[in-house]
Amino acid sequence: MAVVLRVIRLALASAVAGVLIAAIVLPAVGGAGVTVVSVTRELRIAPEELDEPPLPERTVVLDKNGKQIAQFYYQYRQSVPLSKVADVMKKAIVEIEDARFYEHGAIDPEGLARALWKNLQSGGVNEGGSSITQQYVKQVLVNKAKTKKEAAAAIAPTVSRKLNELRHALAIEEKYSKDEILEKYLNISYFGAGAYGIEAAAKRFFGKHASELKLHEAATLAGAVQNPTLTDPSRGKEFRERLLARRNVVLDVMYKGGKITYEELVAAKKKKLGYKGYDISGGCERSKYPYFCLYVQHEILNNKAFGKTVKERRELLTRGGLTIRTTIDPHMQKAAERAIRQYVKPSDKPVAAEALVEPGTGRIKAMAASRRFGNNKKKNESNYNLVADSAHGGGAGFQAGSTFKVFTLATALEKGMRFGDGFEVGGTYQAAGYHTFRNCKGDRVGDPNHVVHNASGEGGGGFKNLQTGTWGSVNTFFMKLQERVGLCDVVKMAKRLGIKRADGKKLGEYETFTLGINEMDPVTVASAYATFGARGTYCKPMAITSVTDRNGKKIEFKPDCKQVLEPEVADAVNHILSGVFTKGTMSGVGGIGRDAAGKTGTTDEYRAAWFAGYTPDLAAAVSIGDPRGSYKYPLRNVVIGGRWYPQVFGASISGPIWKQTMLRALSGTPASSFIRPDMSRFGGCTGGCPKKKPKDRDGDGEDDGDETGTGDDADEADDGDGFFTQRNPFGRRGGERSGGPGR
């Protein structure tokens, strides 16, 4: 059977070559005036236009300074003009593949005849005799193939394929100059080791540009083209030995062809192979900033401006040769990474994640997490985006805890309440009835059976106003405040500031909304808080500033911003939240030496802990929780960063990470100041005033509220964020009411 197949293959190859030789070589013997063109006309072999789709090109992702941080590709390729290819490389490839390339047309009659003769002598198909032009045509047809069947047809040893190839080659020769054809051939060819095109091959093999190749390196790459699989140096010693032998064959051919001297031949053969295996891996796993890379990747995949379908957009990303300029700031990214490493180890089960966003633009300046990105579970790597929502490759996030109280505070100020306005609260809160709270559909969602407790250290209650209630993060106060201003209006306020669940589901509009029952991601929370820093201007998170295609066409992206809150209301929020560092839950951690505001967030049963804060120049949100499931693995009696914690508050780890990040990230940035609030509008109280005012010590004309026990001596143990004693009696999981799984 094997013999039969061998005979068939030989006959087939001979037939193919015979047709072409009969068409070209034999007429030339009969008369000197016979040309290739005339013969092809006699045989009705007319030039046929070749569809040449753009070659798959790698896409590069750049930081704000223009430095590459990631790349995506289907084929690792970076096309270059012939002028950027070393002359010795051009000589080597032409000499070994088609020495008479510049002397013949679409095909080489001498080469074809020689190949036929050698095949007949050997009794096998050992030599093809194809010109560089023909090889280019074949490569185009292979690259165009969308199915295995089409790919097989593009290389099938058939007469029809060879004749079709000839027709296209004739058209190519008419369309382009020889140098243009050579350039196209060098850029489309596969050299092995995952490198497509001469520039990628030069980088992969030798860590240099194609223009910098030396003789022995050029001969190596020229030799690799013949059978890149069998000479792939990345596959081991045996393959490298084959490539070395092939290199020396090329050198011998170049010497015989008069392209190099004997001295050059000897010197080049003495050189080692010199394969360096330069890392050309793509994707976010190999990126220096993997979580930001994932965000950028999904920004492209989610945007219909880059294709009607996800498949089209993915193909553009991996084949389109895009240059994507982004917002990431290496200085700020380093600051976030360093701060996280200070407090949380990559091997820790709980994970810390942080996002930095610029107020007034929405530009994401950094995205960092304590765990490395990857699929190695033994190394405790994460295979999803820990810093972003599910739309950007993330998970379900963690409940935001008391970081949500700021939306209730903003609603109250917008509705006309003043700093001194408040009411008496107890140590617990229960809704008067189901009608106490209504969601935005009008449904009654109050739960008279659900008891909300204050955290340890808050005491039994007393008079709280907007300032003291916020500084102490008093649960019972915010439940009553939400009751007064209306649940739906608080939800609407949160949505105006870009709040949406990390898992993409609808926000849970339950009575404990203000206590942060919805799962969030750091990017979303940081962007919401940046709104206050920008005096009420909300900007959608922005990761990409421009995209340039392979032809130089550039699309620029501008911040997508909207005024969603009166500047004066934002000023009032900033004023109150500034006190969190001096009179509230962050007083034990302290501020950053410039105007800053923020809010801690600790969920029920210590299932997650947050801190979100900002200056006029930069906002950041830090979350910490256990991705295995925050219900099953709360932050109690845990070792994090080599330190044991009986329980983790918002100010225990998240707050210090935020502080250290901001100190480093803003170094060198001139300090900006908040605008002092309009005291004629927000100062004093409208009626809900305490019976007895204590001495005003900070000069703002407001009650310092020391009688509440949340004054200057408040520390991280008095966090008071989101603590409950009772689950939702309607049978919903705690994610709707109190705590919940973090992922």
Image: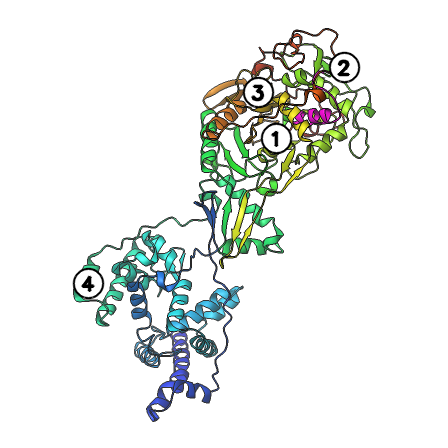
- CA separation, marks 2 and 1? 28 Å
Label 3 with label 4: CB-CB less than 8 Å: no
Splitting the image into 4 quarters, where does residue 479 fall? top right
Secondary structure at numbered mark 3:
loop
- CA separation, marks 1 and 3? 20 Å
Residue bearing mark 1: 529
Label 2 with label 3: CB-CB less than 8 Å: no
Splitting the image into 4 quarters, where does residue 460 fall? top right
Q: Residue furthest left?
A: 263
Label drawn at residue 649: 3
Q: Amino acid at mark 1?
A: Tyr
- CA separation, marks 3 and 4? 72 Å
Label 4 with label 2: CB-CB less than 8 Å: no
Which residue lies at the image location 33% right of the left edge and 80% below the top edge? 120
- CA separation, marks 4 and 2? 95 Å
- CA separation, marks 4 and 1? 67 Å
Residue 324, horizontal then vertical, whole percent? 50, 49
Secondary structure at numbered mark 4:
helix
Secondary structure at numbered mark 1:
helix
Among numbered discs 2 and 3, the one appearing first in the sequence: 3
Residue extent of the magenta highlight: 404-420
